Image: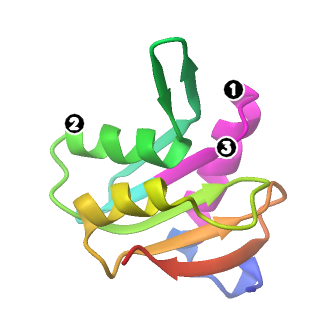
Amino acid sequence: MSDSNELDPEDRKIITLARSARARNSVPEGAAVRDETGRTYVAGTVDLPSLKLSALQTAVAMAAASGAESLEAAAIVTASLEAAEGDLAAVRDLGGAGTRVLLAAPDGTVRATVSAG
């Protein structure tokens, strides 16, 4: 567990963006990723009849589609107590095994920081 006040300002920013996406879209999860150039990509859960993606998978897909070559960090805001393996795999595919994933509660409290690997 970690106090969000201890976070790097850039990590705090992606948590805030993920929280905003979750609230704005009334979806179960919000996520944000930061690429190697510092650009951020924000997404919510996608739940369509023909397409289902977690918020973090969607954010990673947006980064990849925009030409990102790697990820510095990722954040997911969810009621879940742990990151899903599919989310970690998506981050690992673009960012590598050492990419940090911040898992935060809906109020923004960081529950865990895990490695995508």
Residue 90 numbered mark, or none: none
The N terminus, quarter of image:
bottom right
Which numbered disc, 3 or 1, marks the residue closer to the eye?
3
Residue 95 appears in which quarter of the rendering? bottom left
Of the numbered discs 3 and 2, the one sitting upstream in the chain is 3
Q: Secondary structure at mark 3?
A: loop
Question: Image point 24% across, 66% down: which residue?
Answer: 36
* Nearer to the camera, 116 or 64: 116
Do callouts 3 and 1 mark residues in contact (Cβ within 8 Å)? no
Q: Which residues are magenta?
A: 12-32
Relative to 72, 25 lies left or right:
right
Mark 2 Cα-neighbour bin, 10 Å: few <14, some 14–19, many ≥20:
few
Residue 20 is one of the magenta-drawn residues? yes
Relative to 20, 79 lies left or right:
right
Residue 67 is one of the magenta-drawn residues? no
Residue 65 numbered mark, or none: 2
Question: Image point 25% across, 60% down: which residue?
Answer: 93
Q: Which residue is mark 3?
A: 29
| Amino acid under disc 1 | Asn
Q: Position of residue 96 (x, y in %)?
A: 25, 72
